[in-house]
Amino acid sequence: MDNQSFIDAEPAPQKTTHEMRFHGSGSEYFRIWIVNTALTIVTIGLYWPWAMVRMRKYFYANTEVAGDRFQYDGPAKIIFRGYILVMLAFLCYSLANIFAPLILFIIILLFFIAWPWVFYKAVRFRARYSAYRGVRFKFDGTLGKSYTINMGYTALTFFLGIFFLPYVEYRKKDYVWNNLNLGSRKFEFKGQAGEFFIAYFKAVGLVLLGVIPLVIGIAIALAGGVQMEQSGSEDPNIAMLAGFAILIPAYIGILVLSAIAQQLIFCRITNYTLNNTTLPGIQLHSNINFWKLVGIHLSNLFLIIITLGLFTPWAQVRRSKYILEQLSVTTEGDALDTILSTEKTDEDAIGDAAGEIFDFEIGF
Amino acid sequence: MDIPTGSAPGGIYFPDDSHVVLPPGFDYNEIPDLGKENRMLLLVRWIEQYWKYTALAVVIILFSVLAFYLYGIPAMAKSIAYKLPDSVGNGISDHVIDELEDRLFFPSELDEEQQAVLRDGFAGILEANGFNAYRYDLRFRRSEAIGANAFALPSGTIYMLDGLVELEGMDTDGVVAILAHEIAHVELRHGLQSVIRQAGIGVFATLMIGDVSVGISLATALPKILLETGYSRSLETEADLYAVEYLAKTSYPPEALAEALKTLIGDEDEDALINWISTHPAGNKRYEAIRQKIEELGL
Ligand SMILES: [Zn+2]
């Protein structure tokens, strides 16, 4: 949207809001998805990195802001090397699982130790190969901070209880956004932890709400069972049947509620994080509607299940289109046009590809 | 190179890392020195543009998914089942045995003599085939709820229920032949295999539905129920054929297995009898397979 006016008496720079647009379509992405998936199967998985890069590229190249598209060009060859390494590690894990439970413990410990490094490398890699108008993103957070947050704070969660988790999530967002650059411009995230606590507590409350009918169902069924035992009857009585009749929908209810809770966390935290993030002269906005997101998510889920997965590409496009089109940026003057490319940094260590392999949601 | 996807723009990266967007109709094949990787991606892009090739991709995926389901999971389950230490099977069995003894089973009402004859036959099969008799534990029990049935747990505990022994037309040879079938289940680790198969189906459904965590639990139940019978049929037939081989080494006639099966199928109208058939499906096919095996062995 361009509401720039040319009769401008103010010395202050013009503010312009650009809505984000997503141009992808389900049927187009379906063809890309199915062809690349088939190639991955035919090559017993060897083609997977190229398939992954191609699918991700589709989403980047179809996202537009202020008339220009994003680019993703993760080098499949580097991801391939990391992928083979991960597969070997997975093989070790599986074998250890069968033959030596003690080695399994050591492997899990090693993974826990390596995790902050993987996270750090993943964010760097994704930033390095994401670009807008040919200008690359860059992540310059430190490895030490990643250990503080992903290991130190996670360990604290163990002592302080699950209530501490929203704070860890807040610190992760803070770590990613406050160390992210687009070319020569640095992102700045000024959010506080409060909103993270609210989002998580509401989500937990929602799931607990679903536990109530489950508990009632179990109680009724148990009462029926006790009565059955006392009367010495072989046939289940009404209370027991009613209890079981409640249990099944209650179980499905909990599954649906936890899906909704996930959306609640995603929606609130994405809105809050982006609305509190700026680049010099540029303000990000996010206005995702929780109920619309839930509607899209649940209907996607339903359609994916009844099509045995074939609806997946449409589902991904639908969800991405909705979310991305709720985002916008407000720029002062020509802030968007004066972002300059910085020097190319080489990120070709194998570990860097780890993020793409585990498919992190890093949040660009 | 930035080979485009779908109708989205692609472009070109220059050595200084600057990126230039190329117009939609641009023919990337005209660029000199594309390299193998870019040529491959251009080919992939070309395939993606046609619905007919997309249809082929769907067929390939369905075919491999089905092949993996029908052959991949059972083969993997088999190799894992043989690698697992005995303790795993014993652990699973202990719980089941406790449950069964507590809730469903009552002491057998077969007379001592009849039990002794059957135990002789059972021991005979183990001895003739060189199986470890110490791991086996044959238990006679009565259960109105389960009726005419016999089954084996991975640890080697085999239950023979009165209902089956007392079945009209069932003789000692028939019961011993069924015991041989149950021994085959233990020796071939069928119990573990089916547990691992079920776990495999769960993982498989998860992969199919993708990263939708909620879908997993909803989706796993369905294929399990639908396809489990097909799975157990192949294991049953395998147990039948091995049972014939085991019996061939004893003085008991392998034909008795075929006849016992026939007896069970023939009495379908009686409620309790259907049980053994339903957990041991496709009686007629199995009957034919046993006959054929006996012929092959020239017995
Ligand atoms: Zn059987």
Image: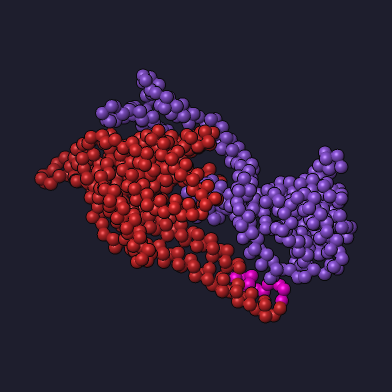
Vertical arrangement, residue A98 with respect to residue B139, above or below: above
Asked whether, in this view, residue B157 is left or right of residue A20, the answer is right
Asked whether, in this view, residue B195 is left or right of residue B159, the answer is left
User: Foreground residue, B252 or B197?
Assistant: B252
Name which residue lies at 10% across and 45% down: A11
Name which residue lies at 44% across and 58% down: A260
In the rendered picture, chain B carries what hue? purple
Q: Quadrant of the C terminus of chain B?
A: top right
Q: Please provide percent x and percent y for residue B163.
A: 81, 63
Q: Is residue B36 visible?
A: yes
User: Foreground residue, A251 or A95?
Assistant: A95
Q: Quadrant of residue B93?
A: bottom right
Name which residue lies at 83% across and 56% down: B121
Please say whether residue B291 is one of the residues in the magenta stretch: no
Please say whether residue A242 is one of the residues in the magenta stretch: yes
Q: Please provide percent x and percent y for residue A167.
A: 31, 60
Asked whether, in this view, residue A226 is left or right of residue B281, the answer is left
Vertical arrangement, residue B79 with respect to residue A233, above or below: above
Q: What segment carries the magenta color?
A: A233-243
Which chain gets the red colouring?
A
